[in-house]
Image (cartoon, coloured by chain):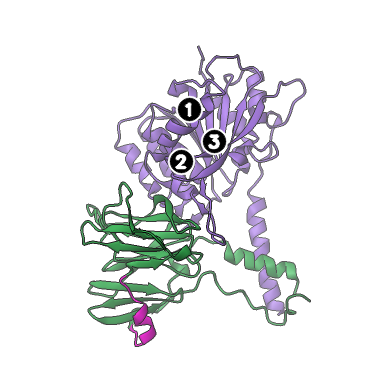
Chain colours: A green, B purple
């Protein structure tokens, strides 16, 4: 197989916007998930461990929770950002360089830069959850990056998916009945807890695994 | 194996075919260096922003050879500025301005070229955060405030810039195009001329709302040039050709001073670059400077 053609095909298939059709798996809905190891990963996403022994936490009670930076040594410090109304959940990017914070009192996900010493800066409302007309508070309960950098924000009744540049990919329906109170993704499945029951739904991984061309010589030859 | 090889070849041929068959656009003499035409000066700068916290970006300024010391200049700001500034690229703005200014077909004007911001990573192994879509696609006044409070004052230290919005233009391609429109829409007191190339008036971050907003908002004192192509994108965010046609229809309905150039190109600068001289002549027609 001509290596140039192989490379061209892979490039053509990789260079696409992340529509819902690249995330969802046809015919796959929410199913009870018996895997105990998944249940232990489910939220609440209130603490994340950063570099240099630092961690980040959501403290307090709704509707006025706070984001807190806990350095390895020294007292915890509140992280105040104008416009972040009620931080409710957080998640670290796969490279640990970005902290996403969900605003249950607003409609944005805020992205912070995580510095080498664990400190946070460069905060902005980089992703917008699409709420119903007139709805001002998202009620977001969890935010999670998958290994490919896609961002998932879980609301009680639906999951908002964003590409790694924080552009909306779309909204994925949650299990009927709403009331989801915990969420997790490993990039191959979405897992929620609803009324004490864990439900899972397959998704397509990102980036897609490399094409295997039958009969092609192994790399390096 | 043969079937796979054929399929891959077909895919590649389709992609290249789509890219070349609908791209009949070529640069004219106003996009090429001409003997005897004075050349302006291009200078690079970098900018760290507070309005977009902790972002950094490259920028360039163009000062025409005919600029008079101390006299405020009309100017245009181009987003994805590196591409617009490149003399070998699709747009070649410094070359075009040199030619048009020399022929007195546009006012003696400056240009500011801005790349989108990024948040550099300080954590080893982490990636920088690209801020392009957030800055360009968001419908808010944040980018206008960034220009007003940071870029214009900074550039004004070296180049006196006109304050009249009729002497200020803003342009961009794709998300840069809708960014340009958003700045003028939000702040017509800052910028009165818009140049959009294959503008992303789609639902990347709610930009598809503009046709409806235009139709139901008192007309603003802005002049808009839209360039679009029938082979532009159709994806999860929307249909670019339809979106730009909706924009043109809305601007027409509200009797804006607008022009819509609809060709056959794709999501690139080939058509826009080929017609840039005409676009600038139209945008800056009947503009007199004090």
- Is the residue marked by circle 3 packed among few (<14), some (14-19), or many (20+) residues within 10 Å? many
Counting labels gives 3
Which residue appears at 51% of the width and 14% of the height? B289
Of marks 1 and 3, the one in the foreground: 1
Residue A129's quadrant in the figure?
A: bottom left
- Label 1 SS: helix
Res. A82 visible in picture: yes
Which residue appears at 57% of the width and 22% of the height? B109
Q: Is residue B188 above or below residue B179?
A: above
Q: Disc 3 designates what residue? A: B78
Quarter of the rendering occupied by the C terminus of chain A: bottom right
Cα distance, mark 1 to mark 2?
20 Å
Residue A136 position in % (x across, y down): 24, 53
Nearest the eye: A114 or B255: A114
The range drawn in magenta is A32-44
Q: Is residue B196 above or below residue A38?
A: above
């Amino acid at each position: 197989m001509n290596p140039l053609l192989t490379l061209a095909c892979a490039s053509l298939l990789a260079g696409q916007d992340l529509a819902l059709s690249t995330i969802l798996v046809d015919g796959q809905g929410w199913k009870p998930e018996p895997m105990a190891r998944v249940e232990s990963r489910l939220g609440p996403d209130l603490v994340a461990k950063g570099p240099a022994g630092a961690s980040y936490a959501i403290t307090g009670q709704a509707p006025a929770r706070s984001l807190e930076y806990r350095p390895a040594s020294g007292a915890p410090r509140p992280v105040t950002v104008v416009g972040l109304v009620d931080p409710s959940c957080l998640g670290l990017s796969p490279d640990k360089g970005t902290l996403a914070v969900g605003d249950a009192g607003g409609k944005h996900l805020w992205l912070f830069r995580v510095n080498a010493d664990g400190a946070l800066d460069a905060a902005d409302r980089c992703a917008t959850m699409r709420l119903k007309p007139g709805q001002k508070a998202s009620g977001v309960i969890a935010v999670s990056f998958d290994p490919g950098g896609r961002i998932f924000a879980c609301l009680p009744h639906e999951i908002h998916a964003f590409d790694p540049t924080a552009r909306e990919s779309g909204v994925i329906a949650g299990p009927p009945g709403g009331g989801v109170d915990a969420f997790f993704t490993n990039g191959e499945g979405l897992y929620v807890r609803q009324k004490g029951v864990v439900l899972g739904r397959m998704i397509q991984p990102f980036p897609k695994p490399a094409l295997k061309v039958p009969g092609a010589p192994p790399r390096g030859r | 194996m043969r079937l796979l090889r054929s399929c891959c070849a077909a895919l590649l041929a389709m992609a290249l075919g789509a890219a070349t068959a609908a791209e009949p656009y070529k640069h004219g003499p106003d996009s090429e260096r001409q003997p005897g035409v004075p050349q302006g000066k291009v200078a690079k700068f970098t900018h760290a922003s507070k309005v977009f916290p902790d972002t950094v970006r490259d920028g360039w300024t163009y000062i025409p050879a005919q600029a008079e010391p101390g006299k405020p200049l009309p100017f245009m700001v181009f987003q994805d500025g590196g591409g617009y500034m490149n003399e070998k690229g699709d747009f070649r703005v410094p070359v075009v301005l040199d030619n048009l200014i020399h022929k007195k077909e546009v006012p003696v004007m400056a240009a500011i070229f801005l790349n989108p911001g990024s948040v550099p990573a300080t954590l080893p192994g982490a990636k920088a955060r690209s801020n392009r879509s957030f800055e360009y696609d968001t419908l808010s006044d944040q980018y206008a405030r960034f220009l007003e409070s940071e870029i214009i004052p900074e550039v004004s230290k070296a180049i006196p810039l006109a304050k009249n919005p009729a002497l200020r233009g803003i342009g961009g391609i794709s998300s840069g195009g809708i960014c340009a429109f958003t700045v003028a829409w939000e702040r017509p007191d800052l910028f009165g001329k818009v140049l959009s190339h294959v503008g992303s008036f789609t639902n990347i971050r709610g930009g598809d709302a503009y046709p409806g907003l235009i139709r139901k908002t008192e007309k603003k004192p802005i002049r808009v040039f839209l360039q679009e192509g029938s082979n532009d994108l159709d994806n999860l965010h929307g249909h670019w050709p339809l979106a730009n046609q909706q924009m043109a229809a809305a601007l027409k309905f509200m009797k804006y001073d607008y022009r819509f150039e609809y060709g056959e190109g794709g999501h690139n600068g080939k058509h826009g670059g080929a017609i840039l001289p005409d676009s600038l002549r139209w945008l800056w027609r009947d503009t007199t400077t004090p």
